[in-house]
Image (cartoon, rainbow, N blue to C red):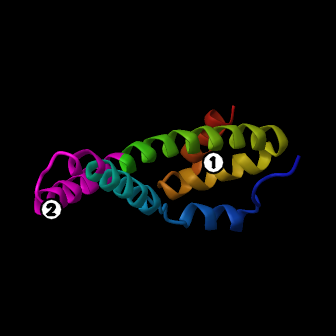
Amino acid sequence: MALEHEHTSHAIAARLAEPIRPSYLRDWVIGGIDGAVTTSANVAGAGLSSIVVIILGVANLIIDSISMTANSGIKAENDDSRRLRDMKRRHIRLAPEHEREEVLQIFRNKGFSGETLNRAVETISR
């Protein structure tokens, strides 16, 4: 079974330097469309004026977009955490020395050095 990414010192440092960029645009669009369609269908038959239907549609579009984006974001975050945990377990099993190097770089970037860094890496790597 292959590892998902390189574990050289340079590759680890590059990964740790990458910013995290979540994207919720798809969920915003789908939620907005769902909100507009649902509102239009529900209020169109109520005999309300066109302007009221439009105002309600826009309000629901915004609310449903936010709601769907938040809900999907939480699910995506949970799914991603599970995926990363499984991947890390696999990497620890297949290449423990590379994972130890990653822990070392993470704690070095946090300001640990010398014996404190070594003890932290040893404790976590156990």
Residue 39 percent coordinates (x, y): 26, 49
The correct choice, above or below, for 17 with respect to 67 in the image is below
Q: Is residue 5 left or right of residue 84?
A: right
**What residue is at 76 percent from the left and 62 percent from the top?**
8
Gap in Å between the C-alphas at discs 2 and 1? Answer: 60 Å
Residue drawn 11% across the image and 63% down it: 51
Foreground disc of the pair 2, 1: 2
**Residue holding disc 1:** 103
Q: Identify the magenta region.
A: 41-67
Q: Position of residue 50 (x, y in %)?
A: 15, 62
The secondary element bearing badge 1 is classed as helix
Residue under label 2: 50
Residue 68 vs residue 101, the one in the foreground = 68
Q: Main secondary structure of the magenta part?
A: helix
**How many numbered badges does the structure rendering display?**
2
Residue 58, given in percent of the width and then of the height, sits at: 21, 60
On the rendered structure, is 13 left or right of 96?
A: left
Which residue type does callout 2 highlight? Ser
Does the magenta segment cover residue 35?
Answer: no
Q: Quadrant of the C terminus?
A: top right
Q: Mark 1 is on which residue type?
A: Val
